[in-house]
Image (tube, helix red, strand yellow):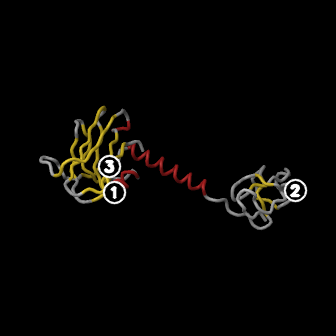
Amino acid sequence: MSFTHYELGGLPKGKVVEVVLQGNTANVYLMDQDNFGRYNKGMSFIALGGLMTFSPIRLQTTENGHWHVVIDLPQGKGQVKTSCQVTATKMANISTKPATFKPSPTMVAAAAAAKKAAAEKSAAAAPAPAAPAGMVTCASCKALTIRGKFCAECGQPMALSCPGCSITLAPSCKFCPECGFKIA
């Protein structure tokens, strides 16, 4: 997702967090660890703040805990420079009532894209299933075939692929010289 994140760490109840914006109007949220996780997943979350059209913004922690400030742009468009600092304790006239926010369409799309990319990366990192004994994968046609000098499916000379690391092997290899995978 495209947002600015400040991890404030453990703060006691009543600490004031001051955020300064330069540029566009932005969503400014002060949230605990659990709600930051929900925000990252594109789910509804509870936080202090909201759409801010002025600066500086002062938000006060409502309990002891691990706190985060997130700044994102409505509709994901524009630019904003930000700064954030923890200041004095218990300032007057600061709202400490959290609200529930729904993720913007931009946040939902970004979370879905991140989830898809993570799933693709995980699938790519998963080792290939081992071929049954006496069977190998042809490097030319990727068919599972009987071990030999030529592929039983496409007739090409067998240049084997290691199921462990996918490098090309000679047909006579019993172990992969790169990763040590037992070939047959």
Q: Amino acid at mark 1?
A: Gln
Q: Nearer the viewer, mark 1 or mark 3?
A: 1
Residue at image x 29%, y 57%?
10
In the picture, the quarter occupied by the N terminus is: top left
Dot 2: few (<14), some (14–19), or many (≥20) neighbours within 10 Å? some
**Residue on which the image places disc 2:** 149
**Residue on which the image places disc 3:** 102
Residue at image x 33%, y 57%?
33
User: Distance between the Cα atoms at labels 3 and 2?
Assistant: 61 Å
Dot 3: few (<14), some (14–19), or many (≥20) neighbours within 10 Å? some
Residue 168 as seen in the image, left or right of residue 126: right
**Residue on which the image places disc 1:** 33
Residue sticking out furthest to the right: 149
Could you tell me if the residues under marks 1 and 2 are in contact, i.e. CB atoms within 8 Å?
A: no
Q: Position of residue 155 (x, y in %)?
A: 86, 51
Q: Earlier in the sequence, mark 3 or mark 2?
A: 3
User: Distance between the Cα atoms at labels 1 and 3?
Assistant: 17 Å
Q: Position of residue 112 (x, y in %)?
A: 46, 49
Q: Earlier in the sequence, mark 1 or mark 3?
A: 1
Residue sticking out furthest to the left: 92
Q: Amino acid at mark 3?
A: Lys
Could you tell me if the residues under marks 3 and 2 are in contact, i.e. CB atoms within 8 Å?
A: no
- Where disc 2 sits, the SS reads loop
Residue at image x 17%, y 49%?
95
Residue 1 as seen in the image, left or right of residue 29: right
- Where disc 1 sits, the SS reads helix
Q: Position of residue 78 (x, y in %)?
A: 36, 32
Mark sitting on residue 125: none
